[in-house]
Amino acid sequence: MQSISVSDIIVKKAAESRIDQVDFDKLVFGTVFTDHMFECDYINGHWQQPTIRPYGPLTISPAAKVFHYGQAVFEGMKAYKDDQGKVFLFRPDENFNRINKSSERLAIPEFPREYFFGALEELLRMDNDWIKPGLGNSLYIRPFVIASEIGVSASAANQYKFMIILSPAQAYYSGDVSVVIAEKYSRAADGGVGYAKAAGNYGAQFYPTRLAQEQGFQQVIWTDANSHQFLEEAGTMNVFFRVGDKLLTAPTNDRILDGVTRKSLITLAKDAGIDVEVRRVEVSEIVEAAQQGTLKEIFGAGTAAVVSPVKAFSYRGTKYDLPAQESSYAIRFKKALNDIQYNCAPDPYNWRYPIN
Ligand SMILES: *Cc1c(COP(=O)(O)O)cnc(C)c1O
């Protein structure tokens, strides 16, 4: 792997910033992008010249393999600004390692670490004004890789495009959601791509999610594909259950995405003295806990919303409402995580990554 420094990235600056056209109080998540983007092509067995240039459309052949065979993976991360104007990433090593893990599963070549971090640092310096301070404000970062080789023969491409685009985001309130526990459709299977952030995992979720929405629910809690007896993920988030004062979540495996938020919440909860059980969680035990009144919370965990509390779930046609919590784990650990992310609390785990 060639080693590069930030100075090796070719930078073409936008002639004019678009920032004045953006109303930062009325952002719709993921629809507005900053002035610059990062691009690097893989050709002839090597990642070529990394480049930052003005954000804008790509020219790409309709025969590019990504359109036909779905070789595409991505990441989702955020940059945060504190009240002194310092910018931080949160555990970006995890995202770097994960995009390469996802790529490996999709037969996409590994991306060099120096390019990834060099690109992020340079982009965040250039588009620094797009990161607004204040709790809830952030810059959503979307690295992704697509197969760009031309040809509709069904084989792994030998050309790829790695990109990073940036989107300013406000606090993301999903509201309390109602969910359906999946009995027919599955998100992932043994030996499949569930652990990868593969674009196709999302594409395949939209239809069953729409069916749930037509019944008045917002999301699906996915169960294992073999027996539908074990609870695995909530929509596109990892999922936690609080029974009594114990926190339960499934172990990661090849069907479950290894979320940064999930693992951070597990650490925070354990260190706060909470009993955390990382084990298979049965649908039947959660239904029983709901019937007995010991099920106190269900929440999704992921970068976009941090936590997303569930207010009710449906299983085999019966709806179970969760009681309102005076002292919710979801709210408590969202705050603890946010305090670290926004540099409002000490960082004993070294999770913050400052951008200088
Ligand atoms: C991205 C993602 C998550 C959350 O991961 P974070 O690293 O916490 O953002 C959980 N499940 C799925 C399926 C995902 O794609």
Image (cartoon, rainbow, N blue to C red):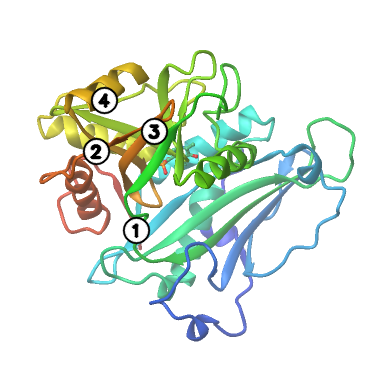
Whether residue 282 is visible, yes or no, is no
Residue 248 numbered tag:
4
Closer to the camera, 203 or 126?
203
Question: In the rendered structure, which amino acid carries the disc numbered 1?
Answer: Tyr
For numbered disc 3, what is the local secondary structure?
A: strand
Residue 354: percent from left, percent from top: 32, 56
On screen, residue 292 versus residue 351, left or right, reads left
Q: Nearer the viewer, mark 2 or mark 1?
A: 2
Residue 322 numbered tag:
2
Corner quadrant of residue 348: top left
Vertical side of 121 occupied by 274: above or below: above
Task: Determine if the C-beta at disc 1 is less than 8 A from ligand 1.
Answer: no
Residue count near mark 1 (Cα–Cα under 10 Å), binned few <14, some 14–19, many ≥20: few
Question: In the rendered structure, which amino acid carries the disc numbered 3?
Answer: Ser
Distance Cα–Cα, label 2 vs label 4: 16 Å
On screen, residue 217 versus residue 165, left or right, reads left
Do the residues bearing badges 4 and 3 touch, measured as CB atoms within 8 Å? no
- Mark 1 or 4 closer to N-term? 1
Distance Cα–Cα, label 2 vs label 1: 19 Å
- Mark 2 or 4 closer to N-term? 4
Q: Which residue is tagged 3?
A: 314
Corner quadrant of residue 328: top left
